[in-house]
Amino acid sequence: MFLKLLLLFTLFPLLELYLLIELGRRVGVAPTILLVVITGFCGVLLARAQGFRVLRRITGQLRQGLLPGDELLDGLAILIGAALLLTPGLISDTAGLLLLVPGSRGAVKQYFRSKLRKALEEGTMHFFWR
């Protein structure tokens, strides 16, 4: 686990930095910075809209007396997507935008669902009620 985190926090930023430098060399510094700013701005608007949409769906489910499981996974994907958009870089922006577009969250939600199910079945995740 430590090795995975080390690679994530060292290699991934280096790859992002390399891509930004390479893009800056090919199209110029100003267009590269503008691209990062525009994707961040559009991402914030999309995250806000999708977040409120999911919040309304969660509220509706709770009012009907239902557990909003799928909506909570949507909310988690939106939260992760918004966080990815806050970090400057082309890969993280692309991944963040994909998590914010409703139709492209299906695979990610399925992954979260399977990880949660596995953790619950193995007993490595516990819920404590007070």
Image (cartoon, helix red, strand yellow):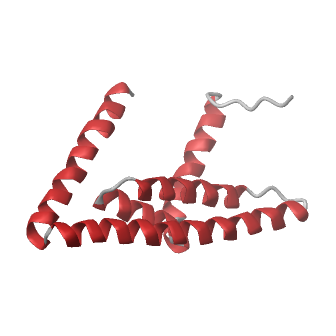
Q: Is the residue 59 above or below the residue 128 in the image?
A: below
Figure quadrant of residue 96: bottom left
Q: Residue at x 50, y 58 (%)?
A: 82
Q: Is the residue 17 above or below the residue 101 in the image?
A: above
Where is residue 122 drawn, in percent x and y? 61, 30
Q: Is residue 54 visible?
A: yes
Quadrant in which the C terminus appears: top right
Q: Residue at x 9, y 69 (%)?
A: 26
Q: Is residue 109 visible?
A: no
Relative to 65, 51 lies left or right: left
Q: Residue at x 83, y 67 (%)?
A: 60
Q: Is the residue 22 above or below the residue 10 in the image?
A: below
Relative to 70, 45 lies left or right: left
Relative to 86, 127 lies left or right: right
Where is residue 61 drawn, in percent x and y? 82, 64
Figure quadrant of residue 62: bottom right
Relative to 7, 80 lies left or right: right
Which one is in front, 82 or 77? 82
Where is residue 112 drawn, in percent x and y? 56, 50
Where is residue 128 drawn, in percent x and y? 78, 29
